[in-house]
Structures are given as structure tokens and as C-alpha cells.
Image: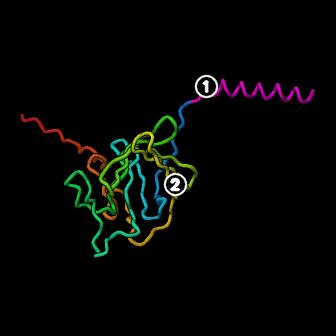
Amino acid sequence: MNFLLRFVLRIAITIAMMILGGRAVAATPTDPSGTWLVEDGRARVRLERCGPSRDRICGFIVWMKEPADKRGQPYRDKENPDADKRARLLLGHQLIMGLQATSDGRFAGDIYNAEDGKSYSVSLWRESADRLMLKGCLIKLLCQTQTWQQTLDVQPGQLVGLAGDLNGPRADKEWAQVPPPRPVQAKAKAK
């Protein structure tokens, strides 16, 4: 009899979960803001809120294990299809472009790869408090997933300011924080 009672209880719980699961709301993504060490250890990327309403996620290279070439010259974005951006330094440039929250609890959008000058589809989400999963795709079938580790320390040469600050990375024009509008003073009417 005890077995039959447990069996019926399990069925009741399963049915209740199915009914309640159908009414579930979309998952709210966990904010991925912070500084992350990429899987191969060559760079740290800071993710922060961006866009006019600060509802997007942008990412910037804030530290590089090798920031300069063998001649001591800093690496530049020489493969960028935009000729105006080819002289910019890789350290401090924006590589994650305004990711939007998705209904499955992730953030999705584009990531720029300075090694080939191309952009790819990307989604990211927190796997745990200190681990971020990043899935990049060339096309839907050709995807690769990396695990990034959150870092709280500061390495020599790391940019510590927020985007746009004196010692921070530089946001691309379309993602730079929009300054608040200046108040317009009313002109006095001539009598």
C-alpha cells in the first residue's frame, strides 16, 4: 500500500509541475557585468551596461597578456573593415556590441574578432557566480562555446576605469553613453 501511495503522489506532483510549468514566465538573465578572464588566458574582458537606456551589455578588452608586438608596438585593430578604426589600439577597444536580454535568460548579439576583422553571433550567460559561458557562431551549425572566469584582482597594465573614463576602455560611437540633454533656458520676451 505504501508503494501505491508514493506512486500516486509522484504522478500528482508531475502533473502539477506540468501545469505550473506551462505558466512560467521568461527567465530573467543574470547580469553578466564584471571583468572576465577569457578561456585561453590571453585577455580580460569587462562587461558593463551600455546604450541610452543602459539595458544592453557591451564588452571591452581591459587587459592583454601580450599588449605589444616583438618591436614593442601596441597591437592595433588593423583588420577592421572600417578604415577609421584600423589605427585604434586593441587594448581598450570594444568587442561585444550591445547584447540584448533573451527570453531564455541569456544575452545575445554580436562579437567582433580583431584577428580577422569580422563579427559573429554570440550569446552569453552566467554558468555560476564566477563562470560565464560564451557561445559564438559563424552560422547556426558552426558554434564554439568558451568558459570565462570572473576576476576580481587587477593585473599590471589593466584598464580600471569604466568605458569613457580617463583610464578606461573606449566605446564605439553607437554604444557610448549618451550625455543627458542640456537644459534650455527660456528667452525673456521683449516688451
Label 1: which residue?
22
Quarter of the image where the C terminus is located: top left
User: Residue 177 at x, y = what percent?
Assistant: 31, 49
Q: In the orientation shown, which residue stands out farthest toward the right?
A: 1
**Residue 38 counted in the magenta span:** no
Asked which secondary structure carries label 2, the reply is strand
- Residue type beneath disc 1: Gly
Label 2: which residue?
147
Q: Quadrant of residue 69?
A: bottom left
Quarter of the image where the N terminus is located: top right
Q: Residue at x 39, y 44 (%)?
A: 138
140 horizontally vs 119: left or right: right
Q: Residue at x 31, y 61 (%)?
A: 90
Q: CA distance from mark 2 to mark 1?
A: 31 Å
Q: Residue at x 60, y 25 (%)?
A: 23
Residue interval drawn in magenta: 1-24
Q: Does residue 165 appear anywhere in the picture?
A: yes
- Residue type beneath disc 2: Thr
**Residue 5 counted in the magenta span:** yes
Depicted 134 relative to depicted 166: above or below: above
Q: Does residue 55 appear anywhere in the picture?
A: no
- Give the main secondary structure, helix, strand or loop, of the magenta stretch: helix
